[in-house]
């Protein structure tokens, strides 16, 4: 077993550096979360996920959506924590997965996937401030008529995922072991 990392970064220092009672640690987490989804109240104009979702439309380029999300993260993080040397920026590159792709699709500039009506669109992104990470994801369908509900197998899959997540959250309690 390689113990060089353990010697270089003792557990006591790790605990001290990541103490959630430390207001600086909480501020970094909250700021990263606010950049992702704008819900912590620090700066409500920073809603990266929502802004990327607003560009989901038929004909939109997957690569352009990914680049837009990453550009927003870089723009927002460049304006904060500028005193000292605080690393910040993209913790998880913006990924846009269509239909049967599950995660981690962030295409190169030459790839030309575009959104089409009926696509199942999954967007995920993450921000870090000094290594404190906040991520978020959202799944939606590109409906032919946004005023009409989704009624296909996609609706069944989204509904099943929602109820599975709700069930998992209700089962998660302190002291409960997961197998």
Image (spheres, rainbow, N blue to C red):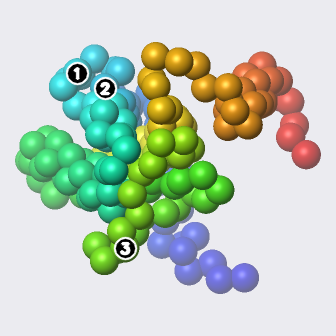
Can you give x and y, in whole percent of width and height, for residue 115 in the image? 42, 51
Q: Secondary structure at mark 1?
A: loop
Mark 3 or mark 1: which comes first in sequence? Answer: 1
- Residue 44 shows which numbered tag? 1
Q: Residue at x 28, y 17 (%)?
A: 41
Q: Residue furthest front?
A: 144
Q: Nearer the viewer, residue 106 or 174?
A: 106
Q: Quadrant of residue 23?
A: top left
Marks 3, 1: nearer the viewer? 3
Check disc 3 and report the residue beneath it. 111
Q: Residue at x 69, y 33 (%)?
A: 152
Q: Quadrant of residue 26?
A: top left
Check disc 2 and report the residue beneath it. 38
* 89 to 22, vertically: above or below: below
Cβ atoms at labels 2 and 1 below 8 Å apart: yes
How far apart marks 3 and 1 lie (CA) works out to 33 Å
Cβ atoms at labels 3 and 2 below 8 Å apart: no
Mark 2 or mark 1: which comes first in sequence? Answer: 2
């Amino acid at each position: 077993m390689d113990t060089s990392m353990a010697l270089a970064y003792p557990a006591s220092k790790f605990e001290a550096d990541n103490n959630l009672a430390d207001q600086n640690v909480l501020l970094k987490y909250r700021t990263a979360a606010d950049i992702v989804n704008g819900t912590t109240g620090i700066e409500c104009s920073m809603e990266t996920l929502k802004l990327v979702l607003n560009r989901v439309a038929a004909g939109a380029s997957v690569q352009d959506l990914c680049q837009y999300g990453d550009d927003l993260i870089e723009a927002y993080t460049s304006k904060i924590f500028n005193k000292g040397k605080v690393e910040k920026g993209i913790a998880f590159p913006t990924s846009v997965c269509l239909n049967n792709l599950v995660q981690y699709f962030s295409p190169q500039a030459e790839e030309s996937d575009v959104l089409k009506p009926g696509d199942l669109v999954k967007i995920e992104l993450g921000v870090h401030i000094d290594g404190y990470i906040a991520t978020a994801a959202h799944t939606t369908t590109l409906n032919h008529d946004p005023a009409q509900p989704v009624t296909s197998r996609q609706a069944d899959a989204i509904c099943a995922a929602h109820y599975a997540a709700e069930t998992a959250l209700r089962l998660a309690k302190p002291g409960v072991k997961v197998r």
